[in-house]
């Protein structure tokens, strides 16, 4: 299998839902299923923070979420845990700046999708050089989901990366909702990644649908 093309990945990144067991108040399998029905295009399994599962429980939980994604042809990305991604034959891995170096992860995962979190131009350029397929950039808006999140930096960081000629697919992350999605896309992101806007929504299906609509409208109009 060859590396995914930029164009294909841009499409997959439009509505990128991230979730772990502690991000939901309802049954996580139902949340993921609804999110898919609402129109998410990519899913990341991110099992961390208070009460996070580990060992076999984590593996079994991931496997079941992956089965739901497979059934609906939604690519399944694993956060941080390269070994788990390989064991599950996931579609990709997402790593942060504090994780293993991107070039080393790239060697381990071959052509699978590699996403890297970047907070500024320097981190973005390094991630690209080391083999990232896409960047997660943020927090764009304040978030209470990630305990150790850096300060929100607004959409300006997205504009800066594009102004410096970076053409790699980018998703914004942090505090994104259907209401502020347009700003994120207009500033240069290819899509939005969200946790709570879907995982804690009264209707994950409806919020996923609204996010997808907001992305579509922003891409068509601007
Ligand atoms: N990285 C930067 S902000 C964030 C992560 C994982 C949390 C995003 O969660 P939410 O609920 O969409 O603000
Ligand atoms: Mg990480």
Image: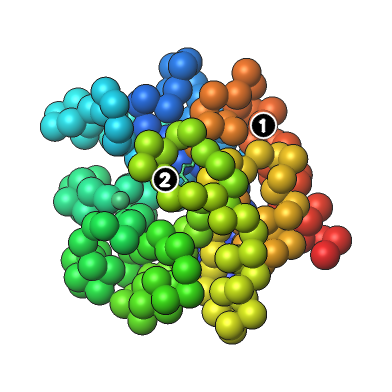
Residue 153 percent location from the top left of the image: 56, 56
Label 2: element kind? loop
Q: In which quarter of the image is the C terminus?
A: bottom right
Res. 126 image quadrant: bottom left
Please give left or right for residue 25 compared with residue 46 in the image.
right
| Residue annotated with mark 2 | 149
Label 1: element kind? helix
| Residue annotated with mark 1 | 207
In the depicted view, which residue is nearer to us: 210 or 75? 210
Q: Which mark is residue 102?
A: none
Q: Does the residue labelled 2 lie within 8 Å of ligand 1?
A: yes
Residue 79 percent location from the top left of the image: 32, 48
Q: Residue at horizontal 71%, vertical 45%?
A: 180
Q: Residue at horizontal 30%, vertical 32%?
A: 49
In the depicted view, which residue is nearer to us: 184 or 114? 184
Residue 29 visible somewhere in the drawing: no
Q: Is mark 1 within 8 Å of ligand 1?
A: no
């Amino acid at each position: 299998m060859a590396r995914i093309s930029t164009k294909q990945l841009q499409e997959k990144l439009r509505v990128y839902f991230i979730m772990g067991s502690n991000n939901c108040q309802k049954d996580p399998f139902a949340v993921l299923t609804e999110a898919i029905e609402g129109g998410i295009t990519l899913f990341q399994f991110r099992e961390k923070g208070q009460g996070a599962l580990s060992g076999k429980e984590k593996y079994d939980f991931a496997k079941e979420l992956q089965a739901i994604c497979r059934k609906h042809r939604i690519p399944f990305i694993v956060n941080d845990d390269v070994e788990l991604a390989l064991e599950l034959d996931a579609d990709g891995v997402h790593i942060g700046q504090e994780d293993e170096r991107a070039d080393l992860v790239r060697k381990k995962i071959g052509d699978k999708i590699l996403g890297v979190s970047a907070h500024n131009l320097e981190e973005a350029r390094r991630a690209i050089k080391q083999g990232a397929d896409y960047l997660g950039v943020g927090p764009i808006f304040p978030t209470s989901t990630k305990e150790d999140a850096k300060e929100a930096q607004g959409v300006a960081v997205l504009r800066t990366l594009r102004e410096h000629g970076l053409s790699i697919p980018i998703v914004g992350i942090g505090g994104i909702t259907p209401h502020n999605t347009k700003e994120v896309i207009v500033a240069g992101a290819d899509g939005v990644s969200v946790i709570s806007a879907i995982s804690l929504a009264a209707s994950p299906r409806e919020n996923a649908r609204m996010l997808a609509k907001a992305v579509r409208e922003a891409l068509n109009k601007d």
